[in-house]
Image: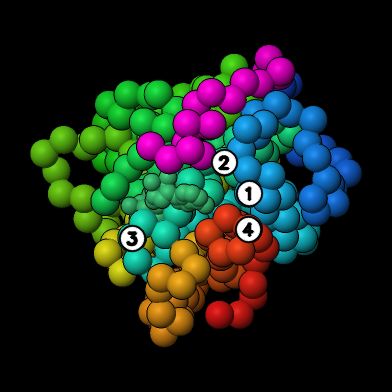
Amino acid sequence: MSKIFDALRKAETKMTGSPRKRRQVRSRREPGEETESTFLRGVDKNFRRGLMNLRNSIDSELKNNDYRVIMFTSAVAGEGKTTIVAFLARMLALGEADRVLLVDCAVVNPEIHALFGLENDKGILDYLSGTVPLEEVIRNVEEGVLDIVTTGTRRGADITQPLFNSEKMSTFIRATREMYDYVLIDTSAVMEAPETPIIGSYATGTVIVVQSGKTKREVIKRAMLMIEKLDGRFFGTVLNRKRYYIPEFIYRRV
Ligand SMILES: Nc1ncnc2c1ncn2[C@@H]1O[C@H](COP(=O)(O)OP(=O)(O)OP(=O)(O)O)[C@@H](O)[C@H]1O
Ligand SMILES: [Mg+2]
């Protein structure tokens, strides 16, 4: 495990559960402003600043939207999607009024459950298969401030496109976007998971995580087009591990 994930584990939180209510208007933090929470202490200062910038970019991108369902993906595997979305989810959840749901749709390499110490015995795949109801797949972590849906197992069955391209998925998104201020979705890389652009079509927008210096611009563009082809809205890219270990901020063009 990387230093960052170690820090994620060790981090402590002051908050003991926030009231369950719909989004309240709250002041936007300036990029780089320190958060009151303790959870990111011990994490690289620049990474922390990058997360705040990312949050502010997403908020400004979504200021005219009622819902904030944001998919995180990448062109190829291992660019840092899970790292960024897990930290962002915790940072948002520790904010004053935000209700945050983190959904693991990364069926190729699910990791969210392990990061948060959850069993992966039931999750989104089981819900979509119709074997487990919604309330049973939502798990509460971090002393009540963050909810998580893991991938689940759906043992013995194919993980195929129709599972996500379904009325059940539509219901899942409609229900959760009403319940939460932010629904963040971790996915597998577009080039290795045909379901990812389909999941993107249900999201308000998609962020593509790019490991700086790793993936060719053409490949990123192809991933972006695959998402847009299925009517997904592309927000921009996050450069991970560039000068500042990032997410530094969102670039609209690649
Ligand atoms: N900014 C960062 N600084 C240091 N380590 C990082 C950073 N981002 C990711 N890593 C490390 O790189 C590895 C891959 O990251 P991660 O699992 O988040 O990628 P991923 O895109 O989710 O991969 P996959 O496609 O397999 O789901 C992990 O070991 C993670 O700890
Ligand atoms: Mg991952």
Asked whether disc 4 touches disc 1, contact meaning CB atoms under 8 Å apart, the reply is yes
In the image, 72 versus 127, the foreground residue is: 72
- Please tell me whether mark 2 sits on a helix, a strand or a loop: helix
Tell me the magenta residue range. Answer: 1-17
* Ligand 1 within 8 Å of the CB at mark 3: yes
Tag shown at residue 77: 3
Identity, as a three-letter code, of the amino acid under mark 4: Tyr
Q: Which residue is at the front of the view, 77 or 245?
A: 245
Q: Amino acid at mark 3?
A: Ala
Question: Is the residue marked by circle 4 packed among few (<14), some (14-19), or many (20+) residues within 10 Å?
Answer: some
Lower sequence index among marks 2 and 3: 3
Is residue 7 highlighted in magenta?
yes
Q: Amino acid at mark 2?
A: Phe
* Residue drawn at the location 85% of the way across and 51% of the way down: 30
User: Gap in Å between the C-alphas at discs 1 and 2?
Assistant: 10 Å
- Tell whether label 3 touches label 2 (CB within 8 Å): no
The residue singled out by tag 4 in the image is 244
Q: Is residue 28 above or below residue 207?
A: above
Question: Which of labels 3 and 1 is toward the front?
Answer: 1
How far, Cα to Cα, is label 4 from label 2?
16 Å
Earlier-in-chain disc, 4 versus 2 = 2
Q: CA distance from mark 2 to mark 3?
A: 18 Å
Q: Are marks 1 and 2 in contact (CB under 8 Å)?
A: yes
**Label number found at residue 87:** 2
Residue lying at the far left in this picture: please name it. 156
Q: Is residue 51 left or right of residue 147?
A: right
Can the viewer see residue 175?
no
Q: In this image, 220 relative to 84: left or right?
A: left
For marks 3 and 1 on the same chain, the one whose residue lies earlier in the sequence: 1
Check mark 1 vs ligand 1: CB closer than 8 Å? yes or no. Answer: yes
